[in-house]
Image: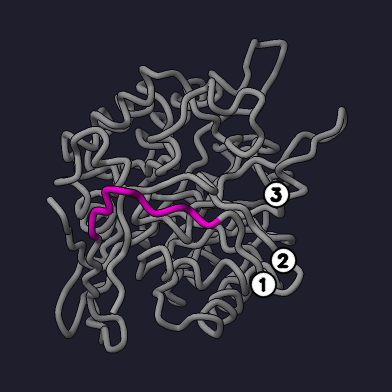
Amino acid sequence: MSTITVRSPADFHVHLRQGSLCKLTTPHVKQGGFDLAYVMPNLKPPVTTVDQAVAYKAELEAIDPSVEYLMTLYLSPELTPEEIKKAKAAGITGVKSYPRGVTTNSDGGIESYEAYYPVFAEMEKQDMVLNLHGEVPSDPDTDTHVLNAEARFLPHLHKIHAQFPNLRIVLEHATTRAAVEAVKACGPTVAATITAHHLALVVDDWAGQSWNFCKPVAKFPSDRSALREVIKEGHPRFFLGSDSAPHPPHAKSVSTPDHGCAAGIYTSPILLPLTAHLLDSFGALDKLEGFVSTFGRKFYKRELASGVQTSSAGAQMSTAGKHPTPVTLRKVPEGVTVQKEYTLAEDSLVPFWAGKKIGWEIVRD
């Protein structure tokens, strides 16, 4: 196969940051081949109110109006059932949960899920999505660390799902075979995102290599195989969420005894070609459209349509300016070298696989 066409790719987990850095990252969504971005709320300060989310969306649309931005709120003590009602009315899609201290800008993360049951109940009623960063904090007293933090989180997933069986839940950036099996066991209201970089990396690739360090960390070869297998299977509840996370080069390349390197891998500007390259490498290229478009869109009720689409509330909404856009990729046997750095004014970012070659490229008119 020398070319492949995908209808309206959608990235269901992306960090676009704020301020001047946001002006660099936001156009990379479209450059990487994507028409929809599910935007994470862990800014400084985090996006905890409807007004903040609406303002943030307006900022993104001012930078690049060609992308559809689905907005999220940060689960925090300030979030109430009344704010959830307001969020639904404002078109906000989901709420992101970060356990305290496990990743970038998660110092305000939660410690107990039961305290948020009234919020989850209202989310279930309003048909909003709960996005879970699926790790527990490291704790030497319980031998909890970055390699088992995801597996030890999974009982929380099962408990929340059992309490709210109709609440749509996404286990974000799954990295383990245990996570794949847990999501499968939960049934149709629970899904998982998988990143491109977790399809490429294992623990040896980030140990001692800060540019490949992210949270959750890449795990063992058997875990990577499980991620690849569920994509080859074409399972409809596993789809792309890049977790593309921009950090300035000095934050990635420097660590001190008191502060490690930043956790995050930046893939947005190369995302669709990179994903095609990886799926091609393990015999799943025929599953590309499902993985990067239709599966996630169906779960999020943003399915492709012509002219109009139906919101989760049942109302018809015009899709003028947001029509499905086919993106065609072609195979490049000699490979395309990934740009070593992206810059805008004083901001710069180093992408995943900088200087390496990808075997696919987007066909641009």
Residue beneath the point at 38% across and 48% down:
358
Q: Is residue 240 visible?
A: no
**Callout 2: helix, strand or loop?**
strand
Tell me the distance, in whole angstroms, between the alpha carbons under discs 3 and 2: 19 Å
- Tell me which amino acid carries mark 1: Leu
- Tell me where residue 184 sits by quadrant: top left
353 with respect to 271 (left or right)? right
Binning the other alpha carbons within 10 Å of mark 3 as few (below 14), some (14 to 19) or many (20 upward) gives some
**Callout 1: helix, strand or loop?**
strand
How many numbered markers are drawn? 3
Q: Position of residue 52 (x, y in %)?
A: 63, 73
Residue beneath the point at 24% across and 54% down:
331
- Name the residue carrying label 2: 347
Residue bounds of the magenta highlight = 330-339
Q: Position of residue 357 (x, y in %)?
A: 42, 46
**Callout 3: helix, strand or loop?**
loop
Q: 57 or 248, which lies in front? A: 248
Is 245 above or below relative to 35? above
Residue beneath the point at 36% across and 66% down:
34
Residue beneath the point at 85% across and 32% down:
256
The reply to whether discs 1 and 2 touch (Cβ–Cβ < 8 Å) is yes
